[in-house]
Image (cartoon, rainbow, N blue to C red):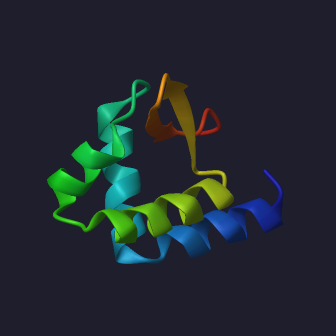
Amino acid sequence: MEDKYVIKALAALAQPNRLQIFRLLVVKGAEGLTPALIAEELGMPANTLSFHLKELMHADLISQERSGRMAFPQISRHFS
């Protein structure tokens, strides 16, 4: 893995809320969770969660699997 990707990933995980989200998704595994379930589990407002999910996706730590209108954030295949 190149240094620039490692730096981007570590910077994203340096924020406590993003680290909690990433840990939760690691525990959940390949099927991921809906944003509503993540927000409920972590007691986080939906708009805050959306911001942090975007940052984790930008760092290529997570991806989203779509099923109809639902999106399921999950750990990027680089980490599974």
Q: Which residue sits at x=55%, y=38%?
A: 64
Q: Is residue 57 left or right of residue 49?
A: right
Taking depth in this image into account, of 18 and 68 the one nearest to the observer is 68
Q: Is residue 28 above or below residue 30?
A: below
- Please state the total of marks drawn on the protein image: 0
Q: In this view, which residue lies farthest toward the front?
A: 69
Q: Is residue 52 above or below residue 40?
A: below
Measuring from the top left, give residue 71's x and y in whole percent: 46, 36
Q: Is residue 8 left or right of residue 24?
A: right
Q: Which residue sits at x=83%, y=57%?
A: 2
Measuring from the top left, give residue 11's x and y in whole percent: 59, 75
Measuring from the top left, give residue 22's x and y in whole percent: 41, 53
Q: Is residue 66 above or below residue 55?
A: above
Instruction: Classify residue 37 by image quadrant.
Output: top left
Instruction: Classify residue 76 by image quadrant.
Output: top right
Q: Is residue 29 left or right of residue 14?
A: left
Q: Is residue 49 left or right of residue 66?
A: left
Q: Is residue 63 visible?
A: yes
Taking depth in this image into account, of 44 and 68 the one nearest to the observer is 68
Q: Which residue sits at x=57%, y=66%?
A: 55
Q: Is residue 80 visible?
A: no
Q: Which residue sits at x=70%, y=63%?
A: 6
Measuring from the top left, give residue 56's x and y in whole percent: 55, 59
